[in-house]
Image (spheres, helix red, strand yellow):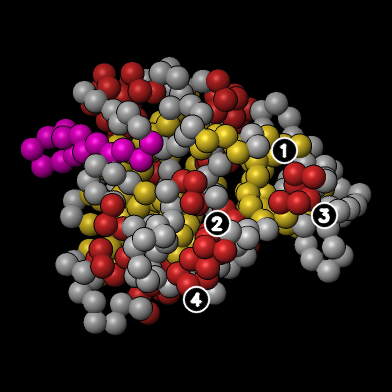
Amino acid sequence: MNAEWSAFLQQAGAVPAAGRVSHFDRPESELRAALDGNLRCDLSHLGLIAAADSDNESFLQGQLTCDVRQVTLERSLIGAYCNPKGRALASFRLFRRDGALYLELPGELLESTLARLRRYLLRARATLTDASDAQVGIGVAGPNATARLTEILGKAPAVVNEVIQATVSESTSITLIRLPGPTPRFELHGAIREMRTMWEALGSAFVPVGAEPWRLLDILAGIPTIYPETAEAFVPQMLNLQLLEGISFQKGCYTGQEVVARTHHLGKLKRRMYLARVDSPSPPRPGDPLFSPQSDASQSAGRLVDAARHPDGGYAVLAVALIECAEHGMLQMGDASGPALQLQPLHYGREVVA
């Protein structure tokens, strides 16, 4: 985390842990705000890779599942970076700002992903750098988020993935991105000075929160995140990325494209991602195995993608599971003695995935 930004947040009451904000001394009320309040969140738990120079777009186009050409100053997309076998090594949100393309991903995966991407640069006129400390990201969510951001910046994106570059002075701007989810939610990126002003301008009506409430909102929105524990575990369609505009089937070749395209054209996906609640005695973790009495003993019923504590008790989880077991049987954590997952509907725009 940028030292200047960290000092500012600590003056505002932030409790740091492992290079991120854990909470602002009220973890229970902060988590509750994710469901029925307005919140502002430091996003320093996410890293940024900046891709610059003349070939940055064409280089990333050959590496990522989404159509990078559609990522403009007015539009952001999510996508995945796969190995040659079509398994996701990392997931991203991509956006443009100040002449560069930015790939936002969990900080734990930044170093390994950056090193792997650099190996494929070859003769491309592109530079890849860790830009995590060069600018600041904050999240804003809640029923009053759109109105408040419009008051401060004069406008706010109306539809998912829309981006607005809000000019705050002759030389600086704030990049404002509309995110998916059942509640209005936005990311803001900019220089530290502008982000300090934004944080303070949001006011006390927006509860300051750490990383966990934002993670919960991602889960409830059905947005998958790859962590070190789940790297190379899932084909992108298993993560529902095709429902989130995270896969282009017309863009042409990229690493892992053959497997992703074959899965799409055969239409024989056996596993996909579900939203669920579970009352577990211990915190679920990404990569934890699932059990189903309906599954063949020779194969796993699935694995957890993500998990976060739910303010109403237990945990909200995203899980990739065998469709047959999830929809016509039962899923449990770990083994036959583990707690059962209670599936919840996922809302992707107008599409509801039960």
* Outermost residue to the left: 170
Q: Could you say which is closer to the camera, residue 22 or residue 248?
A: 248
Residues drawn in magenta: 160-175
Q: Disc 3 vs disc 2: which is toward the camera?
A: 2
Relative image position of residue 276 (x, y in whole percent): 69, 39
Residues under labels 4 and 2: Cα distance?
Answer: 15 Å
Residues under labels 3 and 2: Cα distance?
Answer: 21 Å
Residues under labels 2 and 1: Cα distance?
Answer: 19 Å
Q: Which mark is residue 291?
A: 3
Q: Tags 2 and 1 in contact by the CB under 8 Å rule?
A: no
Image-based side of 316 in relation to 155, left or right: right
Q: Which mark is residue 84?
A: 4
* Outermost residue to the bottom: 122
Q: Earlier in the sequence, mark 3 or mark 4?
A: 4
| Residue type, numbered disc 3 | Phe
Which residue bears the numbered disc 2? 237
Quadrant into which the C terminus falls? top right
Residue in the image at 48% along x and 66% along y: 261
| Residue type, numbered disc 2 | Gln
Residues under labels 1 and 3: Cα distance?
Answer: 14 Å
Look at the image and say whether residue 104 sits in the magenta stretch. no
Camera sees residue 117? yes
| Residue type, numbered disc 1 | Leu
As helix, strand or loop, the secondary structure at mark 3 comes to: strand
